[in-house]
Image: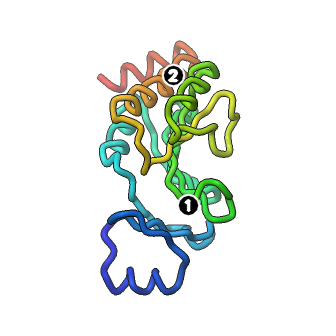
Amino acid sequence: MQIGEKRMDWLREAYPLAESGEKVILCLSQSQRRGMVIKMNKYNWLDDYLQAKKGCAKDYKLEWGWWRYQVGGKLFAATCQPGPEHQGYDCRELLTLKCEPMLAEALRAEYPDIIPGFYTDKRNWISVFLDGAVPDDVLRGLCNRSYELVFSKLTKKMQREIAEQAQ
């Protein structure tokens, strides 16, 4: 979202922030962020990619400040921006995905921008800093894997219904 220069000046004065290149990271509390849409990740294809998955439903969970992507009513991806009350996240936007435990460990060892899942079971979920350096093809693969893990746990009947709706 483009924010007018006067609005940016007001935000700079009203809230603590950190600047990184041309990106502005606002450190707002969860209550201050309610209803705001701040997109600053480098993966501008991500939202369309997730929504293109068969049977994907996207909604906004106001209480959590999360955009959720679900298939068959089950979460397979979510984006959020933890506020300053969550130390170690530096108000950076995150994508949270389902992942097998051994793969999650290997990914965290290889990519510093992949961390244990934020507010999820840290054995079965990972979070990716969306301003980080995870290659696009790796992130696409992780999105696909998360979707497949969740889709495979749906009932066969629900899997068939979703496949039929997609055709």
Q: Amino acid at mark 2?
A: Phe
Quadrant of residue 52 in the image?
A: top left
| Disc 2 target residue | 151
Marks 1 and 2, the one that precedes in the sequence: 1
Asked if 160 appears above or below 11 in the picture, the reply is above
The N terminus lies in quadrant: bottom left
Residue at image coords 56%, 36%? 75
CA gap between label 1 and label 2 equals 31 Å
> Is disc 2 placed on a helix, strand or loop?
helix
Q: Is residue 75 above or below residue 101?
A: below
Across and down, in percent, residue 69 comes to: 49, 40
**Residue tagged 1:** 91
Q: At numbered mark 1, what does the secondary structure look like: helix, strand or loop?
A: loop
Query: Of discs 1 and 2, which sits in the foreground?
Result: 1
Q: Residue lying at the far top in this picture: please name it.
A: 156
Residue 144 in picture, x, y percent from top left? 42, 26
User: Which residue is at 55% across, 69% downward?
Assistant: 27
Of the pair 86 and 64, the residue shown nearer to us = 86
- Please provide percent x and percent y for residue 2: 30, 69
Dot 1 surroundings within 10 Å: few (below 14), some, or many (20 or more)? many
> In the image, what residue occupies the spot 54% across and 79% down?
15
Pick the front one: 105 or 7:
105
Given the image, on which type of amino acid does mark 1 rest? Cys
Please name the residue shown 39% across and 58% down the image: 40
Please give left or right for residue 119 compared with residue 115 in the image: right
